[in-house]
Image (cartoon, rainbow, N blue to C red):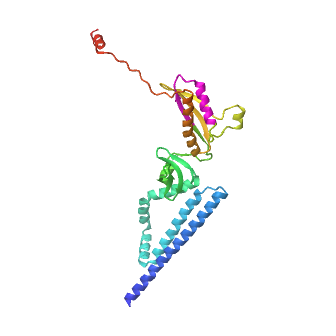
Amino acid sequence: MDTFHWFGSTAQLVLRIVLILAIAIIIERSLRFFIGKFMRQSAQLLNVDQTRYVFFKHVTTAFIYIIAIILIIYSIPRFRTLAVSLFAGAGIFAAIIGFASQAAFANIISGVFMVISRPFKVGDTIELIGLTSGVVEDITLRHTVIRNYENKRIVVPNSKMSSEIIINFNLYDEMVRRYVDFSVDYNSDIDLVMKIMKEECEKHPLCIDARTELDKLEGRPKVEVRLIGFGESELKFRAYACAQNPGDAFELHTQLNVTIKKRFDADGISIPFPQRVISYRNEKEADSDKTT
């Protein structure tokens, strides 16, 4: 009878644990589905930032499973006794847990502050100085996921994100002013070089007009080209072309490199290469210098 009673109580306990986990999974999946659906509709219809919804989805998932774990512990008599003993020594236990979880709590707090202050959001193109660059895909309780331009996912702890200098290409204004730099030979016609660079930039379909009405009244060009410096064997020119967003700016820059170089070749403008003049003396001249 004791054996049957033990099996019966154990079966009830296992069934209770499975039921708690099943309910937790169903609630978690349902909430993630509805939050995701609401997030997509809001983003499409109202142009609402998805970052807070994504972070809220992760917080909800963590909260549901924490409640499930607490219920499971409470349903097991031995674990319940252990939990009471641990709470009795809560001061020491909290100190140990707090010391061991400093990094985890730092990441969680950093994630909360990032969602509130919004230095970047899901979908933004960012660059961590000296580390990586790409598009923000997700902000979880612990880390931020960045998809770089090789389609690789870079996982960065939130505490690292909050302490690094971040360049956000989408904050407030996505427009990018791209520098198009070329160096030409000193014998080149300066006016012709500037004319070619200006024409090629202005006629490119991805180059936008970022001038204000005042700029237009003052007669400022859509694309400005300037002589910015003198090298050892070259004149350095720079065109200031604007694009709608970082992706267009990259395409604009790479395509202008091709079209401007072709125009230079057609008009006889050469791009210089380093030149050195080496002088040497023969052995007789060196010996005569020594005797004198």
Position of residue 92 relative to residue 139, above or below, is: below
Would you say 278 lies left or right of 183 here? Answer: left
Residue 28 magenta-drawn? no
Position of residue 122 relative to residue 13, above or below, is: above
Would you say 201 lies left or right of 105 here? Answer: right
Quadrant holding the C terminus:
top left
Which residue does the image show at 53% across and 51% down from the upper left?
Answer: 135
Span of residues in magenta: 179-202
Would you say 122 lies left or right of 274 here? Answer: right
Where residue 54 appears, as percent x and y from the top left, is 56, 60
Which residue does the image show at 40% across and 85% down from the upper left?
Answer: 7
Q: How many marks?
A: 0
Where residue 277 appears, as percent x and y from the top left, is 41, 21
Where residue 102 appears, as percent x and y from the top left, is 44, 57
Pick the residue in front: 159 or 195.
195
Position of residue 125 relative to residue 240, above or below, is: below
Position of residue 128 relative to residue 19, above or below, is: above
Pick the residue in front: 50 or 264.
264
Quadrant holding the N terminus:
bottom left
The residue positioned farthest toward the bottom in the image shown: 1
Where residue 263 appears, as percent x and y from the top left, is 57, 31
User: Based on the displayed image, in which of its 4 quarters is residue 80 positioned?
Assistant: bottom left
The residue positioned farthest toward the front in the image shown: 266
Residue 199 magenta-drawn? yes
Which residue does the image show at 47% across and 71% down from the upper left?
Answer: 69
